[in-house]
Amino acid sequence: MNIQTIEDVVIKFAGDSGDGMQLTGGQFTNNTALMGADLATFPDFPAEIRAPIGTLPGVSGFQLHFGSRKIFTPGDHCDVLVAMNVAALKVNLGNLRKGAIVIVNTDGFDQKNMRLANAETNPLEDGTLDGYVVIKIDVTKLTREALSEIQMGVKEKDRCKNMFVLGFLYYMYSRTLDSTERFLNSKFSKKPDVLEANLRALRAGYNYADTTEVFASRYKVEAAKLEPGTYRSIMGNEAAAMGFVAASQKCGLPLFLGSYPITPASDILHYLSYNKNFGVRTFQAEDEIAAICSSIGASFGGHLAITTTSGPGVALKGEAMGLAVMLEIPLVVVNIQRAGPSTGMPTKTEQADLLQALYGRNGESPMVVISAARPSDAFDVAFESCRIALNHMTPVMMLSDGYIANGAEPWKFPQSKDLPEIPVKFAEPITDGSVYKPYDRDEKLSRPWAIPGTKGLEHRIGGLEKANITGNISYDAENHEFMVKLRDEKVERIADYIPLQKIESGPEKGKVLVLGWGSTYGAIQSAVNQLLADGYSVAHAHVRYLKPFPKNLGEILFNYDKVIVPEINNGQLVKVIRDKYMIPAIPFNKIKGTPITSAELIDVIMKNY
Amino acid sequence: MSEVAQQLTAKDFQTDQEVRWCPGCGDYSILKQVHTVLPQLGIAREDIVVVSGIGCSSRFPYYTNTFGMHSIHGRATAIASGLKAARPDLSVWIVTGDGDGLSIGGNHMIHLLRRNFNVNVLLFNNEIYGLTKGQYSPTSQLGKVTKSTPMGSVDHPFNPAALALGADATFVARSMDRDPAHLQEVLIRANQHKGTSFTEIYQNCNIFNDGAFEVFTEKASKKENDLFVKNGQPLVFGESDNKGIKLDGFTPIVVDLNDGHSKDDLWIHNENDIYKAQILVRIFDDPTVEGHMPRPFGVFYENPNRATYEDLMTAQLDAAKAKGEGNLDKLLRGNETWEIK
Ligand SMILES: Cc1ncc(C[n+]2csc(CCOP(=O)(O)OP(=O)(O)O)c2C)c(N)n1
Ligand code: SF4
Ligand SMILES: [Mg+2]
């Protein structure tokens, strides 16, 4: 069979949540990364862990975009869809490119599955798939046949269906099975039967594709021309967790995480609890309030303390964040945003907690806010959050979201020696009997970190307003106004210690600037680069430092006729930009629990051009 | 005992801050007893941290010359948990009120107790919200008329000692502001305990709930209404130690020692007996009701054997490190990498 080389492709694996599509997608991603393509992924989980089998809400999807060119997003539309049942097809039909390849498991298209997916007629027969290349495979039957000699229950055999599909796709994309065989060998090393069944199903799928010639040609995507170096695959939450461990190593303080499980933040807690050999202490508290409070206690004790959660948890932490602002102690609060309000849509992505991060506390309670833009960036932002918190004795809010947290991409990971040290100096013991001044300040306006156990530094701090320098309780009118302004100035002054805003792509002056933050990075890059190639005067700037803003941000904004601010919310950064720089920034908002696509962006840029 | 710790006196634990409780408030006495006890513990001042929440009682850290944090309402227990997990070397004291520790902070309290951090909880119970000027609290008596209960409270009150035991506390005691010697003794015991010590201290709020514990604290009524328990001793009380408590099956009953009963028949207090402790803390009669049982004071229960949270945590860290200290470059590389040339 001939092999056709293509530049990039978007594949979506979709099935019932029990079909193992996340694992299949993950394996294919890993294999793709190892052959050197650039990629971006988007896992799309059902809201319920065990949604009814075969129903529309039960569909679990994993989208992978890979190519030999730079890949910015998981892709707007799919070129290939793997649909394990009727529901999986129905849910994803709207997102298929014309002429796309649809691989279906015919066993998932019987009467029962039609009923469960509310389909009146069979989409394989009623013309729904006219105009697509349909490959029909009875995966269930073929998998059972392949495992006929293995002694195990039918239910267990059926669990290997995803490996059959994976093997099939490996053949289709001219891959080898090595990486998945390695994975299976280590995962099932203690269950030889299960291992054998999975390996057989994988090979059966591969061989089936080879012998049946169900498609006209195989495909190949060459390695991408990425910057030379050593790469690994990375997901956002894993990257954040590593960033914290790295910061802990570089500042020489043990890491303490107080956390309470919540989607999509829990993986950071899981990951860090496996890093005890780095001295990482993880404390799963009874709720988010206790989680942040335990971190405040650990920070008071001289540890690098963080707390991780999602929007509802941040709401609960509000009062304690205010305490951290008053105490002026280092603390990193991580919000892996999800669609709100209230419980909202836990598994769907949104960027709607920016205003909460900036303003969501009682009183004048300024806090540093910085945001990750892509999975690997979560590493740098986690590290940077710690650096700022420690250097400036302040709480920092790090923002990420479900899309970044669960998305994967290749990462040219740093070497430990290339990461900057974060020097930390605790206040020195006092032996001459003089009184310690806990709110004395340096040129950054940050106060000393005086940890218990240090002779002569006994002092009391708390949430009550205090006099500067001495830290004694003060209800004095002038003092309160002075302290409010001082705490604000302290955060604003951090602008002197962060990089200037840069332009990601496009001219330094021009017609339209697309100003983004967070996970819209890839979509904006891809849209702007496309328009630049077509000769338009469009630029992209992406804001990492949301409080304080980089000092030159205002200047940049005035270099363009129009500023468009795309966000997965109802217009939040745009409000802050308008407020601070008084420019008529144009909002573009999508609030559907899914990422903004580059096609949508091109559309809105052209409309405003 | 470090040299400095040896030389310390109560005065060393006073701060330059003016104490702002209402004159006559029971908090003064508790502060004085704590200041008396601290120098006897052999702990250097800089190794002690007092963490409090919000309330009149929670002003405590400002008046105690150690490290201290006056935090937010109800959360002292959670902050102390993180501090102790990070710094097992410190002596951590939590000062909280009946509102702070049992209402807004009730959840953190029970979790602190079950985890058994080696910290000391001093719960100042005045059966009222003092700082907010007199609303009923989770320990206020049923029918209590307060600013927010003009027709009397319809909330059934907590029995803090029973609550603590129910949360698997490993040390549960009760004392009072008006009995300095007893309070000091209990505080010393609380500090000696390895694990979370929970000490409920009856404290008079003479402004909003004056006399709430009068029958237990005043000379005239104390003997008849209080039962001071001592390990290994029979439960005896009364004007001339003339009464005792005996167990009739699982039910404690009062017997008259001048009426044919001898001390040998009585319940002998055993601090380490969890079953009997459950009964002891349940002796919680309303003292205004005819024929009521006396209110117990002292150390009700101690389990010296349960591991502390921080010890278990440290053991896991050590075990993980024993298998190989973390290597950042190894972590960053992960399991699979590839080269781009
Ligand atoms: C979040 C929050 N809610 C309410 C308050 C108001 N408040 C302060 S102290 C207190 C009750 C204090 O009662 P208790 O803990 O019994 O302390 P006491 O003053 O009696 O010593 C309340 C309701 C607060 N400070 N913070
Ligand atoms: S209000 Fe009550 S508890 Fe508060 S200081 Fe005054 S007397 Fe003490
Ligand atoms: Mg009270």
Image (cartoon, rainbow, N blue to C red):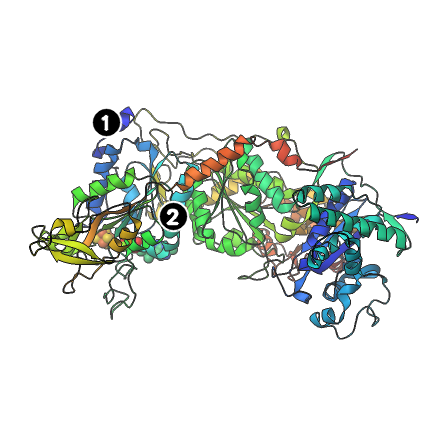
A61 vs A257, left or right, is right
Quarter of the view holding residue B159: bottom left
Dots 1, 2 in contact, CB < 8 A: no
Chain of the residue displaying label 2 = B
Which mark is drawn over residue B83?
none
Quarter of the view holding residue A227: top right
Q: Residues within 10 Å of mark 2 (few under 14, many from 20)?
A: many
What is the residue that sits farthest to the bottom in this orientation?
A: A120
B322 vs B214, left or right, is right
Find numbered disc 1 in the image and state the secondary structure of the residue it sits on: helix
| The one of A241 and A458 positioned closer to us in this rendering | A241
Find numbered disc 2 in the image and state the secondary structure of the residue it sits on: helix
| Residue corresponding to mark 2 | B112
Mark 1 and mark 2: Cα distance apart in space? 33 Å
Residue drawn at (73%, 50%), measured in percent from left and top?
A197
Q: Residue A75, how many percent across, how many down?
A: 75, 54
Quadrant in which ligand 3 is drawn: bottom left
B257 vs A274, left or right, is left
First in residue order: circle 1 vs circle 2? 1
Q: Residue A242, how many percent across, how many down?
A: 60, 39
Residue A525 appears anywhere in the view: no
Which mark is drawn over residue B7?
1
Residue A356 appears anywhere in the view: yes
